[in-house]
Amino acid sequence: MTTINISLPTNMYKDVKRAVKVGSYASISEMIRDSLRKTLYKEVTVNGLTPAEEDEILETAATPDDNDEVWETEEDITRGFEKLRKKIKSKSVKNKTKRYIQHPI
């Protein structure tokens, strides 16, 4: 992990320390990392997924159990998320094509 130094106005630093003290964050670094994540990765949800990934997982969870997959290893998880992302990308391409056909430029 890389270390950086930042300058904060005194009042902001006091507010940050107060937030850490009351348990909102484990450390000042964690608060800053969380703020950066929210700024840099707006499309990622709290659990680290994109809204499309989250929607696909919820949709899959609502399907019958005979379609379930069991992920037991890191490789299973990696393959499962790769499959999920391909499925989302495929849906996105289909939706873009459908919109183009319905509303040509």
Image (cartoon, rainbow, N blue to C red):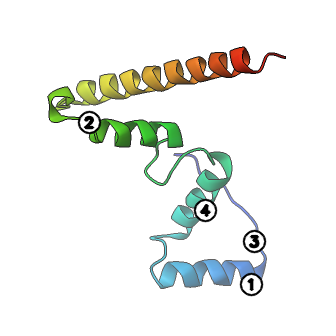
Check if mark 3's residue and mark 2's residue have beta carbons within 8 Å.
no
Residue at mark 1 to residue at mark 3: CA–CA distance: 8 Å
**Res 93 → quadrant:** top right
| Distance (Cα) linking label 1 and label 4 | 16 Å
Callout 1 secondary element: helix
Residue 16, compared with residue 80, is above or below; it is: below
Image quadrant in which the C terminus is located = top right
The amino acid marked with disc number 1 is Asn
Most foreground residue, 58 or 30: 58
Q: Which residue has dot 4 on it?
A: 32
Residue highlighted by disc 3: 8
Q: Which residue is mark 1?
A: 11
Instruction: Between residue 41 and residue 26, name the one nearer to us.
Output: 41
- Kindly identify which residue carries mark 2: 63
Q: Nearer the viewer, residue 80 or 5?
A: 80
Query: Between tags 1 and 2, which lies in front?
Result: 2
